[in-house]
Amino acid sequence: MKKILFVSLCALLMIFAATSLKAQNSRDRWKYDDYFPKDYFSTDSTDYRKHVHVGEVVYYMRLADIKPLFEEKQGAGDTLLRLNYIPKFAHPLFIQVRRHHDQIRLEWQKGTAFRGYITSSGYLEPSDTGFVDVTEKHYYGNSWEKGILDSGGRELTWEEWNRIQQILTDIDFVHYKHANGCWGFHTPFILEYADQKETVAHYTECPDEEKEERLTKLLVSLVDPQYEDMVVYSGNVKNGIIKPKYPGGEAACKQFVETFVRYPDDALRDKVEFTADLDVIIEKDGSVSYVRDVSWPESPYGFADELIRVVKTMPKWEPAIRRGDTVRCYAHITHKFTLPKKIRPQYGSPVLETQRDKNVWERIEECHRQLLLNPKDKEAAVRMGCTYYGEFLLENTPITVLTALDSMFYKGAMLTETDWSTFHDRTPVVSHPGDSALKYLYQALQLNPDKETLINLYLPILQLEYNLKKTHNPLAELPYDTVKGVHFPYSYFLNRPKDGVFDNSTNYIGKTSSSFFWVNAFSKTLSEMGEPVLYDDTLGTDEEVFRTTFTPSFHPSVSIRVTKNNDHIHLYWKKLQEKIAPNGWQVTDYFIEKGDKELTSNQYAQFLEYWNAIRLEELPPSDCVMMLDGAQWVMEQKTPEGYKAHLTNAPGTDIKDMFKYLLKIGVVFVPYVDMY
């Protein structure tokens, strides 16, 4: 019997010890019972939001060696006011104002810690590195470090103290509730007040604008007027916040992400899907300044890193507004990476009726396989986009306009004339080819292909956006007119659409490729001659330059430049002769014949008559007809008002007459000009 009683007593003692330990663990969990009375801020043990945020404040107080104030009575006429202020993504700030007799002193210290991400779990323990879930041992938070970043103090004036005292009277701490947490401000703080009679404290995340927030802003301004700019708000309407907005709204933001995000290679190989979540800070100017992965569970395969890469390229947002002022505010962006259901594109089933249809579809499937295995394959993205672009043109082009010489597949094999002859019904292989083309051309932009490809894709993207009534994407803004090292802008010799109105049957990839060819050909010729680049030159108020370059097949190229600088007028001519190898066809080197001559004012006036008869300002940049060989003329005019050029291989008599006059006054022997 005694043995049974002893065992029972031991069991009761163990239960009591376990219960006490559990209670102690519960108190230790939130770490603030030694600073405030138990359940002072909330009697609800499941109210993790107040527990965690009060625990944050108290944890910082412990790190900063701030002593508990509760139940500390002041002397007669003495007052002590304290603010523990911990904005998200900003340094914690502790401020204390003590009045002792006629002396009023403010002291403050700024902590080194930053608040991080707080989960909805109710079992978090503060640690030196963050908050740890004691049940699952998961880590939350970031950059909790011991130490003080800065500190200071000064005497307050009676005017400053009276401003504080006036707000304290409005707050009436004695009758104030201890806690007010709306879970939205994400800047918890605790106000403590002690006088001769009692000590009270108040915790809030949603301060009253005319009371707590007014007092907080006043105290913060006494320390550092600029500190408020470090605070990041959450988009909670209870705090008077108008959330930051992506241009075009949430749908446009989602479309931006879906357009440019790439599936991680390893995840695609292992067939893994994941939802990535990010917190971002939208600054007062709308820029994205902070992007942090808050995915749970932790992001595998670099999903979050890929989403971060895309978000950092976003255009500026419309910033958050709080009571009429722009403020820093955080936003949340999420994206679900979903595996493609099948290799075929999502834009309908193919229509395979001819050999050409089969060729197109084989190209589409080949590119899709390459992109599924390696989303960073820029060549595959370009080929895919341009293949769909060819189908888009087919959908919008009269059959009589299509020829076997039209290249619908940039950097791909040309279809044979037999293939093109099968266009009997003008039916594209896939439905919605414009949508598909734009999707893959956008993807090609994100992959940073070579500059030539980027410039080639610029106008087709604008054309597709115009046709599909899409908002112009900022990443399509390419420096296609500012390429250095050439004598003309790379896309100069294609005739751009007027007023931004695109003809949807025009093959801009083919036209831009043609412009590339002529720019490179003429730039090579002019570079060999040592001729200057005119289009990006800056001229004085009384300077003018006119240049005509003649490049015939099988004969030396000739360039004549007329310059006027105040009263000095000069003509410079150069002829590019080729050195041919003994085999009779290979060019081994070049040598230049050249000369110059000062022109009279009468000769210059006569030249201007010939030049003005061309009406260069009214001519398009390019006016070429299809031919196997022949000659090309480029006329350039550079004045202080700007630059204009015109390329043609079918000049009228006005251009030939002008060129012959220059040959005559320059004493240049070019007998073969009449052959072309």
Image: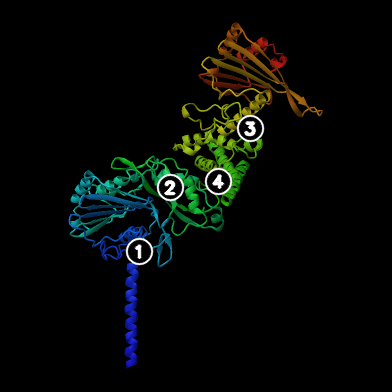
Tell me which corner region of the image, top left, top right, bottom left or bottom right, holds residue 320. Answer: top left
Circle 2 is placed at which residue position? Answer: 290
Furthest residue toward bottom: 1
Per the image, the residue denoted by label 4 is: 350
- Up-down: is 520 above or below 665? below
Nearer the camera: disc 4 or disc 1: 1
The spot of residue 30 in percent (x, y) is 33, 64
Occupied quadrant, residue 126 = bottom left
Instruction: Say which label, 4 or 1, has the lower sequence index.
Output: 1
- Where disc 1 sits, the SS reads loop
Q: Which residue is mark 3?
A: 405
Camera-side mark, 3 or 1: 1
Place of residue 141 in the rendered image (x, y in percent of width and height, measured from the top left): 41, 57
* Kind of residue at badge 4: Pro
Q: How is the image coloured?
A: rainbow
* Contact check, label 3 and label 4, Cβ < 8 Å: no
Q: Pick whichever, 598 or 198, lies toward us.
A: 198
